[in-house]
Amino acid sequence: MRVNGVQRAATDDTRRLLSDHLRHDLGLTGTHVGCEHGVCGCCTVLLDGAPIRSCLMLAVQAEGHDVTTIEGLSRDGTALHPVQQAFHECHALQCGFCTPGFVMSVVGLLAQHPDPSPVEIEEGIAGNLCRCTGYASIRRAVHRAVELSTQGERMTGRQ
Amino acid sequence: MKPPPFAYHAPASVDEACGLLATLEDAKVLAGGQSLVPLLNFRLARPQHLVDINRVSGLERIYERDRGIAVQALARQAAVEDSEVVARICPLLTEAIRLVAHRVIRNRGTVCGSIAHADPASELPAVLLALNGHVIARSTRGDRVISAAELFTSVMETTLAPDELMVEAWFPESTDRHAIVEESRRHGDFALAGAVRYADRLALFGVAPTPVLADPHDPTRGLEPSADLEASREFRLHLVRVLTDRAFAA
């Protein structure tokens, strides 16, 4: 499987969850593990560009697919991704445990709806839990991420 | 919170999958995994064999058949949700899928998987029942058409045989008046109770061991919903009456 653009060896342990494979075998501990039954959203990663729960997939199932984790969002490793920048600006994190999952869900949301309605934003983040209950800031951050993404597209001449 | 040991099989074709199901003892089919993997993680399910059908090619189609819409075993819920042909031929299915968990779950979860899992509080089995749809079960013995009325037998139990793979679910064309309404504690949660209306037909979910057809004029007749931490029996009966009214006001 390709993880953040790098070809990685497959695990031969078929019981290994993708979330555990990322964390324990590849050292990508940015993907967090909360409930391990698909409710909390902390382990959300992109599979071929679409957000999925990495705790509800076996690592062997990702063979031949592209996986993007929070570590792979920043293209050159320095500048923040617009969604990360928006979370930073809007103070959309307290303890930070849920943040990677939220960010990956929002990246998926904006890929599906580049200019989401307020309802689409609410539904887009409804599958992620924040135990610090910072939802108001997170919602603001999604609006800000839309602005930053649009600005970025204008600056690079893309529409 | 990790899956128990199992032997993993990843067949490349439906024939190969059916061959495995015919010979393996205690095998479970893994499609989207959004219900089965949590059960494995909790060790509530401990199958000896997992037959992962995700490598089977040509099983993702959503297509028109016999004045209805057929959804193959690997068609993700998100793909069905976004399908224009589904929205045109069976808009009730589009609306129902939007109530299934969250988009991130629907990116992986399948329509056939939801039906085969047969959770009593799940939307899609109730939609199949309200519309009088069917599923096609394939095995090395051949194909079998199972109508919704004959499919669901108890909590997470169906008449699918252990060697059968549900290759397709079929929903009849249904552009008459319809509604799906439910009450849940949080958006995306399993419903405490729900109602699906199509024309004069009413199917209820979350209030019996299987989805059930009910009389729209007397929807609680014969119902004995269970009580749990989330809702008492009386509250569920109340919800059935309110949701039925809402479904038929739509």
Image: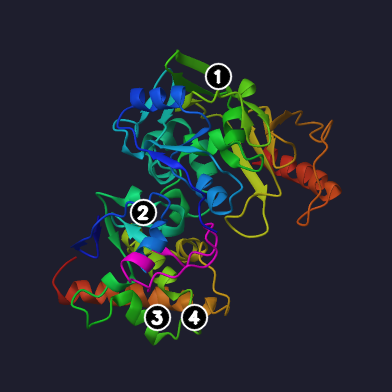
Q: CA distance from mark 1 to mark 2?
A: 34 Å
x, y percent for residue B99: 55, 49
- Tell me which residue sits at (53%, 26%) in the image: B162
Residue under mark 4: which chain is it in? A
On the image, numbered disc 3 is attached to which residue? A87
- Tell me which residue sits at (53%, 39%) in the image: B47
Q: Nearer the viewer, residue B175 or A43?
A: A43
Residue under mark 2: which chain is it in? A
x, y percent for residue A12: 32, 51
Mark 2: amino acid: Ala
Q: Decide which of tag 4 and tag 2 comes sooner along the chain.
A: 2
Q: What predominant SS class does the magenta segment belong to? A: loop
Which of the numbered marks, if any, corresponds to residue A59? 2
x, y percent for residue B111: 48, 37
- Tell me which residue sits at (57%, 48%) in the image: B39
Q: Are marks 4 and 1 in contact (CB under 8 Å)?
A: no
Q: Nearer the viewer, mark 1 or mark 2?
A: 2
Mark 1: amino acid: Ile
Neighbour class for label 4 at 10 Å: few (<14), some, many (≥20)? some
Q: CA distance from mark 3 to mark 1?
A: 50 Å
Neighbour class for label 3 at 10 Å: few (<14), some, many (≥20)? many
Q: Nearer the viewer, mark 3 or mark 1?
A: 1
On the image, numbered disc 1 is attached to which residue? B146
**Range shown magenta:** A24-44
- Tell me which residue sits at (38%, 34%) in the image: B85
Q: Is residue B40 left or right of residue A75?
A: right
Q: Decide which of tag 4 and tag 3 comes sooner along the chain.
A: 3
On the image, numbered disc 4 is attached to which residue? A137
